Image (cartoon, helix red, strand yellow):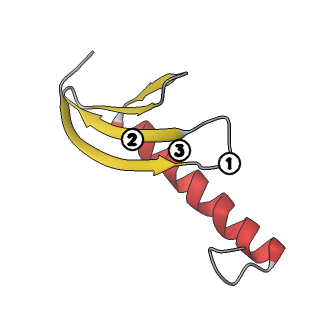
Amino acid sequence: MGIVTKELASIEFKDQALKYLEIELNDGPIIHLQNDAFRIEMKPEEFTQFASQVVNSANKMIQYKNITSYDE
C-alpha cells in the first residue's frame, strides 16, 4: 500500500451491490480505483486512457439514450 497523495474522486452507489468507488493518486505515482471488493492500480498514463474511454462511452450513452439530465 502506498501513501495517498490526493483523493481524486469518491462515488457512492445507493441501489447497487457496489456501494462506493474511490479514485486515489498515490505516491509512485500510482492511481488506485478501489472499494471493499477490489483494487486496481494504474500508471497515470493508463488512467488517462481509461478515463478518456469512460468519458467517451458516457457521451455515446447520453446520445444513444437521449438523456437530457443526470436524473434519468
Instruction: Look at discs 2 and 1 and give the one toward the viewer.
Output: 1
Horizontal and vertical percent position of residue 34: 45, 30
Residue 45: mark: none
Ranked by sequence position, the earlier of labels 2 and 1 is 1
Query: Circle 1: is it few (<14), some (14-19), or many (20+) Cα within 10 Å?
Result: few
Q: Mark 2 points at which residue?
A: 23
Q: What's under tag 1, amino acid-wise?
A: Asp
Instruction: Compute the Cα span from label 3 to label 1.
Output: 25 Å
Q: Which residue lies furthest to the bottom in this view?
A: 68
Relative to 9, is 50 on the left or the right? right
- Foreground pick, 11 / 42: 11
Hey, which residue is sitting farthest top in the picture? 1
Distance between mark 2 and mark 1 Cα atoms: 20 Å
> Compared to 4, does 12 lie above or below?
below
> Which residue does the numbered mark 1 point to in the structure image?
15
Report the residue marked by disc 3: 50
Amino acid type assigned to the residue bearing label 3 in the image: Phe
**Residue sitting at x 58%, y 48%:** 13
- Up-down: is 62 above or below 51? below
The residue closer to the viewer here, 53 or 69, is 69
User: Which residue lies at the image location 82% right of the left edge and 73% below the top edge?
Assistant: 65
